[in-house]
Image (spheres, helix red, strand yellow):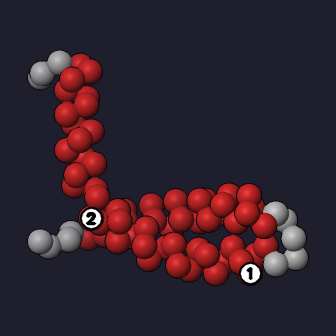
Amino acid sequence: MMINLPALIFSLVMGFLMSLSITLVATFVRIGAGDSFFSVWLEMWAVAYPVAIICILIYRPFATKVSAVIIEKLTGPK
């Protein structure tokens, strides 16, 4: 299976934004806004970002198909 450039760029951008946001909130909830917040957050983000990219590349085709089925059920066949 070959990954095209738009799908790869989408995965990089979406992975960056989602992993940054989720690790920010999760780190804040877990340790609060203490002195070590930014170092812990960046450490967690450095792990989450590559995982997010891989997950987006793997799950995007499936999520696209499921979304299409849901939309068809909600709006009726074309």
Left or right of residue 13, residue 22 in this image? right
Q: Position of residue 55 (x, y in %)?
A: 35, 65
Identified at 45% across, 61% down, the residue is 14
Question: Of helix, strand and loop, which one carries label 2?
Answer: helix
**Farthest-out residue, front:** 30
Which of the 4 quarters of the picture holds residue 3? bottom left
> Which residue is denoted by mark 2 in the rendering?
58
Identified at 61% across, 59% down, the residue is 21
32 over 39 or under it: above or below: above
Q: Position of residue 71 (x, y in %)?
A: 25, 29
Which of the 4 quarters of the picture holds residue 78? top left
Q: Position of residue 54 (x, y in %)?
A: 35, 71
Q: Which mark is residue 15?
A: none
**Farthest-out residue, top:** 76
Q: Residues within 10 Å of mark 1 (few under 14, many from 20)?
A: few
> Which residue is denoted by mark 1 in the rendering?
39
70 over 40 or under it: above or below: above
